[in-house]
Each structure stands twice: as structure tokens, then as C-alpha cells.
Amino acid sequence: MEQHNSGGNLWMRLAGEEWVVLEEVYLTEASTYEWKYVMNGIEQPPIIYFCGQLLPLHRLEKHEAFGQLITPFSSGQISFKINGTKIDSYIYPDARKMTEEQYHLMLGDILNEASLCFEYSGIEIGITVDQHSRELSLAQWSYIEASFSLLRSMMRRVIEHPTRALQAHEQQIRREQVKMVDIQTLAWIERNRGRSITGTIPEIVKSSVREDSYNTYENRLLKRWLVELRHLLKLYRKQGPVEHAIRAEFYSDKIEHWLRAPFFKHVVTHQGLIRISQVFQKHPVYRQCYQWFESLYKHGNERIGLSYNYPLRETYALYEIWCYMQLIKVFREKGLLKDSKGLFRTTRKGLFLHFAEHNESVIQLNNGMRLSYQRVFQNDSPQFYTFTQRMVPDIVIEAGERLYILDPKYRVANNLGTALGEMHKYKDGILLRRNDERTVQSVFILTPVQSDGLRYFTEDFHERYSMGAVSLMPGSGIGPLSDFIDKLLVQEI
């Protein structure tokens, strides 16, 4: 991609690395960068915008200004604006991050397993399974968070080149200004020429005029969708947690900006039924817009609550929940799922999946075992306790007085050994209250990293050290996890 010349004044780097001029910097998503601006002579402190947001100035030394920025959790073209001059750049995907397809695949898996587990919950409440639900949901918010940058790109292209069409309307004009005579114009002249004193064509003629208009069906429908999305974001601002409210307000401001585009002033909001026009089928940008808004309301399998304390744009949080739900799926398919009501929370507003951080979600199994998400261990815990610090492993399998701990880690491609080293705190630091003996039998990492012959994934390593890694990638099946549970169940028989 051809870069604009910034004059060589803005430099960037990751912490501890060399400074690189903006034109040559390689930006990756969800990363923190330091920046410095070298001022020429008596230049005033710079005014720098990144993705439309003003960058705060942290320090000023002689002819250099310093600051910090965090790239968004999405890739694509972005821009800087330095003292009024726009400079384009690009944010590349984080190689450790899953693809967007896998992200939405995890959401679908969670929802599908939740609907299957509901019959084991004993909860007597009606639930909605409409694929086009208008209810607020975790899945819908995640979709907005993950794909709003795509919508922003599409709307920029629509505003730059909106569709338009020749549309005819009747108006009264002087006869010498008539450019086109159609059947309606001739009929009007025949009816009205007799009213003229001379019997000639009247000086003022009612004629059809064709003009370019932006008030096409596609633009009217697009305006309707944007207005509806703006209203939807207002609901998220009111009913969601603080981090959602802040993001929803930012998204809403963007939509307000789009609706103020000059061409939208001539567009009337569409009312009535929606159909797929030729433009929506063939125009690349409008087709993408149609697909984006069509997908916005396809998150109705289960209404999932908004009482979550983690930011959903951090995929690791979703991966943790997905791993837990996949583990439930393994036990369910083996006929061991007994009671899943700990997975759900009911309120007057409906049914919610219960995945608040540090708030245990417990599943009962037929063989007396328990499966917990975000179980808390601390010094005053009744049966199992820690003698050092409070510990909250992601997934705990409890079999009587024995514990098995699984910790999802989706960004450990180059440091599996370090991640496993951290698991020792669970293995050595959680004790049985009645005799102070170590109670954790084994600790394992769940990761999308493929084994590729690494010793941490081998059966020999697992048996010898009672720890290791298990590969679990969205879309690749749960065979390794199922095999792991089979071995665990053999030990407990």
C-alpha cells in the first residue's frame, strides 16, 4: 500500500524496540505503541488524531513530544491526522488471534450447547428460539463489536459513491424549457390548449422532468437500518455494563455522523416490507451492507445476559467460555450430564447464561463429579483452600476430594513452557482442608495451538508429570478433549 509522506516527524515503536518512522512502521492490532513527534524549529506541539480520536500528549521535551496509543482489536486501513494533514496506514492482524470466522463459530457453539443443556436444568420458563430475535444479547453485542469496523469501511464507501437513479416527477415549467415530451405531457397539452385564448400551447406547461436522485430503495432501506441500529445502541448504553455503554456511545456517534452525510438529506426512510433488489444482489458494497444488517438480528437461539464484566472484544474471554461449554458437551454426549441449572440465571427479563467473572457456574454430573467455571479458592474456603494467594482457575473438575484443573490459553504459541510453569501454583498451592494434603491431581492447558510433535501434548508427558497441553481449536472437532476425559474417567472408576 502506498503511504503518504508525513515529513518524517512522527515515529513509533513497541516498548523497548527501535523507533521507526510512520511510513515504515508495522502496526498490529490490540498492541500498545509509544510515539514521538519531532518538531522543526519553533513548531507548536502537534495535534494528532488516530482513527478519529485525539492522541493525548504525555510529555514535551525541547523539540520532541511523546505519547502512547493502543491499536484497536481489528485489522484494516486506518488514518492519522497530523496538524490537519491526513496520513493513511494499515493495522495488520495479530498472528496469535483466531480468525473472525472462528470467533463467530465459538459464539454459535456456545449458543447451541446452551439450548441442548437447557433440558437438564429443571428450569420451567419459556425461552425464545427465533433466529431473528430483537432481544439484546451477548451474541449480538459481540457481533457488533467484532464487525463494526467492517460496517464503518462499507459506509465510508457508500457515502463516497452512493447509488442514484433517474427519477421522473411532474412540474409546471415554461414551454420553451420543456426538454422531453412524453405521453403524459401531450395529454396535458390536449386537455389545456383549448383554454388558451389563441388555442395555442399554453406558456406554462405541466411536464415530466427527470433528475438524478439519491432517494433510491437501497438508500432508503440503508437509512432505516442505520436509524434502527442507532436506537439499538441506545438500549445497550442503558442496559449494558459500563464498558459496553462507552463503546455503544462511540458507535452511536459514528452513525450520527453517517446520517449527516449530504446525500442522506435527500433520502426518505423506507417503510414497509424489505426485498432483495438487484442492487443488493450485484453491487459489492450494498450487498455487504445487506448481509451485515441481516446478520445483526440472527442471534436469537438463546437470550444471553449482558451482566458480564469482561470486554468481549478480547477473544480469550470467549475462548474460555467456549472451552467450558465444549467440556460440558463431552460429558453430555457420554450420558453424564445430570443438572445444568448452574449454567443459567433467570430474571424477569428472561434467561441468561451465567458467566460473570469470578462467579462460579457449577454443573452436576451423574457420577457424583462436579464441573465448575471460575471457581474461587482462598484461605477461608471450606473444603479446599490456598495458603498463599487467592486462586481462580478457569475450569475445575471435582471428583470427591480430588481436583483436575484445565486452563484455556489461546495465546501461548511461543511460550507453552512458561504457561505450564504458571500452572504449578494450582498443583502445589490448593490443599484439602481436613489434612492439608495436595488435592490437585493434574493440571492441563487447553489451547488452539496444534501439537506438531511438541512433548507437552504427548501421552507420555501427561502420564509422567500429570500436566501438559490439550489441543482444542474451534471447527477442528473435540476428539483430543474427549480422549482426555475418557482417561480421567478411567482413573476415577
Image: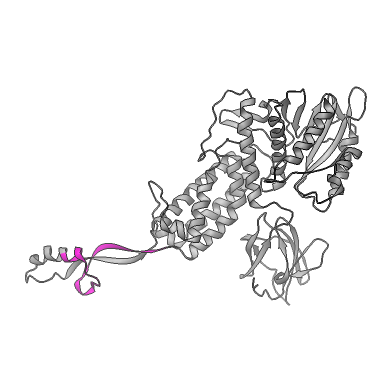
Confirm whether residue 388 shows in the render: no
Is residue 403 found left or right of 352 in the rendered image?
Answer: right
Quick check: 174 above or below 137? below
Confirm whether residue 102 shows in the render: yes
Number of labels in the image equals 0
| Residue plotted at (86% across, 46% down) | 456
Please check the rendered image and state whether residue 418 is part of the magenta-colored stretch, yes or no: no
Quick check: 182 above or below 390? below
Quick check: 378 above or below 82? above
Please check the rendered image and state whether residue 181 is part of the magenta-colored stretch, yes or no: yes
Looking at the picture, tell me which residue is in the foreground, 328 or 487: 487
Looking at the picture, tell me which residue is in the foreground, 248 or 397: 397
- Quarter of image, res 462: top right
Looking at the picture, tell me which residue is in the foreground, 203 or 387: 387
Residue 86 at x, y percent in the picture: 61, 69
Is residue 80 found left or right of 186 in the rendered image?
Answer: right
Q: Where's the C terminus, which quadrant? A: top right
* Magenta segment boundaries in residue numbering: 163-186
Residue 325 at x, y percent in the picture: 69, 36
| Residue plotted at (75% across, 30% down) | 371
